[in-house]
Image: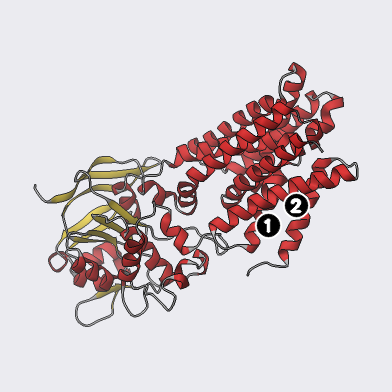
Amino acid sequence: MSLFQIISAIFIGLAAGYVGSFMILRRMALVGDALSHVALPGLAIALLLNINPFIGAFATLFIGIVSVWLIENKTELPTESLVGLFFTFSLAIGFLITPQSELLEALFGDISKISAVDAYLAVILSVILIVAMYLISKGFILSTISPDLAKASGVKVSRLNFIFLLLVATAVALGIKAVGSLLMGALVIIPAITSKNITSSLRGYTVLSSLIGLISLLGGMLIASKFHLSPGPVVILASSAIFLVSLLFTKK
Amino acid sequence: MPGEILKVENLSVEFFGQKVVEDVNFALKKGEVLAIVGPNGSGKSVLFRALLGLVPYSGKVAWQKNIKISYVPQKLAVEKDFPLTAGEFLTLRGAGPRHETETALEEVGLHKRAKGYDWLLNKKLGQLSSGQFQRLLIANSLTGKPDVLLFDEPTAGIDIAGEETVYGLFRKLQKSSSDLTVIVISHDLNTVHSFADLVLCLNRRQVCFGRPHEVLDHQLFHHLYGEEIQHRHPDNHLSIS
C-alpha cells in the first residue's frame, strides 16, 4: 500500500465515522445507505466525461440532498418512502449508464487507484468536514431531541439541517473512492452503531465512532492488500466484525 | 403601558384552514405568574408555540425588547440509549459558567452528593427518572438568567418532583428573583389558586382572563370542561377527572 492510500484511509475513515455518528442519532441509517446510491449516476457521468469521479459523485449527491431537504421542508410526506423511490431510481440509472468495465469499481470502490491529488483532496475535505460537524454539533443535537427547544434557543434548524446534509453528501462522495457506492452506506452506519452500543456520553460516542471508522477502513485495506482481495467488501467485513465484538461489551 | 413584558392582541393560529386558537388578548407585567388552563386539545400548547414564534399566527405578540425567554417543553424525544449525558445536555444551549449551572440545579432540588454532581451529570439522559428529567429541563431553562420562563407542564399523572410540587419550585424561584415572569400551562387546577397571579382559560377561544379568585368559578369550569369536572375537595378546589 502506498502512503497516499494510507493517509486517505485514515482521514476518510475518521470523517465517515464522525459524520455517521450524527446520522444515526437522526435515525438516518437508511437515508445514508440510499443516498450513497445516488452517487452512482454521477460517477458514471464523470467517467464518461473523463473528469474527477469525486466531482461527479458530489454533484448528484448534492441534487439528492437538496431534494431530501425540500421534501422535509415543504411537505408532510414521510421522507423515508420518497427517499426509497428516488434513490433506487438513481441506482437503476447509474447501473445502466456506467461503462461495463468500470462498473465493479464504481460499485465496490478501489482505493488502490487513489492518486496524489485524490489524497490531498481527501485530507483537506475530511478536516473541513470534521471541523464543520463539530461546530454545528450542539445545535444539531438540541434540534434532534427537540426542534421547538432548539428554535426557542435561537438555533436556525432548517439551515442547520441543510448544512448537515451537505456534510453527509461530502462524506459519502469521499468514501466512494475507497469502498464504492454500494458499500459506503455501511461505512457511515456500522462504526456509529458499534460505538453507540458501548458508550454513554456524546463525546465518547462520536470519538469512538470516528476511531472505528478509521480502524475499519485502514485495517480492511491492509488485510485486502495482503490477501489480494477487493478492499471495499473487506473493509465492511472488518467493521462488521468490530460490531460483533462490541456486542460482548454492550451496556444495557 | 409601562412595565408590560408581553402584550398579546387578537392572536389567532390556523392549521389547514381551521382555527385552533382564536382571538386571544392579554397582557403581562414583569414578575407575574400566568397559568394557562383548558381541556385537552384546547390550543394551550399551540398558544405557547405562537408566543415563542414557532408557528405562524395572525394578530400581535409583542415582547418587551431585549428580554431573554426560556422554554421548558412538555417532553423531549430522547430514547433510552441516546448517547448524551445530563451534563452534556446542559451545555447544548451554550455552556454557562459551572457555578451558574450548579446554582440552577440546586434551585430545582437536584442536590450535590458525595462527589458533587457526578451522580447526575455523568448519567445518560435516558436513565434519569421522569422527575429528575423534568427538573433538569427546568434547570436548563434557568441557566443564562432568563427574564421569562415558559413552562409546558407534563400531563397530569407524571410524578414531577416527588414530595415537592413544581409550583413550590416556582414560588421559591420567585423569591430568589422577583423579576422572573412565568407562563405555565397547568393541568392541575387545584394549584392554580395558590401559585398564579393571573389565569387564562382557553378553549380554542379565550374563555376567561384575570385574577384566579375573580374569574374561576364553577360555572366557568362547567363551561370550559363540560362534564369532565368533579369536585375533589370541599373547599372549592377543582380538578379534572
User: Taking B8 as reference, is A141 left or right?
Assistant: right
Q: CA distance from mark 1 to mark 2?
A: 9 Å
| Residue A155 in view in this figure | yes
Q: Secondary structure at mark 2?
A: helix
Q: Quadrant of the N terminus of chain A?
A: top right
The image position of residue A81, as x and y in percent, is: 63, 42
Residue at point 37%, 60% (across, down): B140
Q: Nearer the viewer, residue A212 or B163?
A: A212
Find disc 2 in the rendering and name its residue: A239
User: Taking A34 as reference, is B104 left or right?
Assistant: left
Q: Nearer the viewer, residue A12 or B123?
A: A12
Check the image and name the residue furthest to the top. Answer: A49
Mark 1 and mark 2 in contact? Answer it, CB < 8 Å: yes
Find disc 1 in the rendering and name its residue: A194
Q: Amino acid at mark 2?
A: Ser
Q: Is residue B227 above or below residue A44?
A: below
Q: Quadrant of the C terminus of chain A?
A: bottom right
Quadrant of residue B135 within the rendered picture? bottom left
User: Taking A203 as reference, is B139 left or right?
Assistant: left
The image position of residue B31, as x and y in percent, is: 17, 59
The image position of residue A213, as x and y in percent, is: 69, 48
User: What chain does mark 1 sit on?
Assistant: A
Mark 1 closeness class: few <14, some 14–19, many ≥20 residues within 10 Å? many
**Mark sitting earlier along the chain (1/2):** 1
| Residue B155 in view in this figure | no
Residue at point 71%, 62% (across, down): A246
User: What chain does mark 2 sit on?
Assistant: A
Q: Nearer the viewer, residue A239 or B239?
A: A239
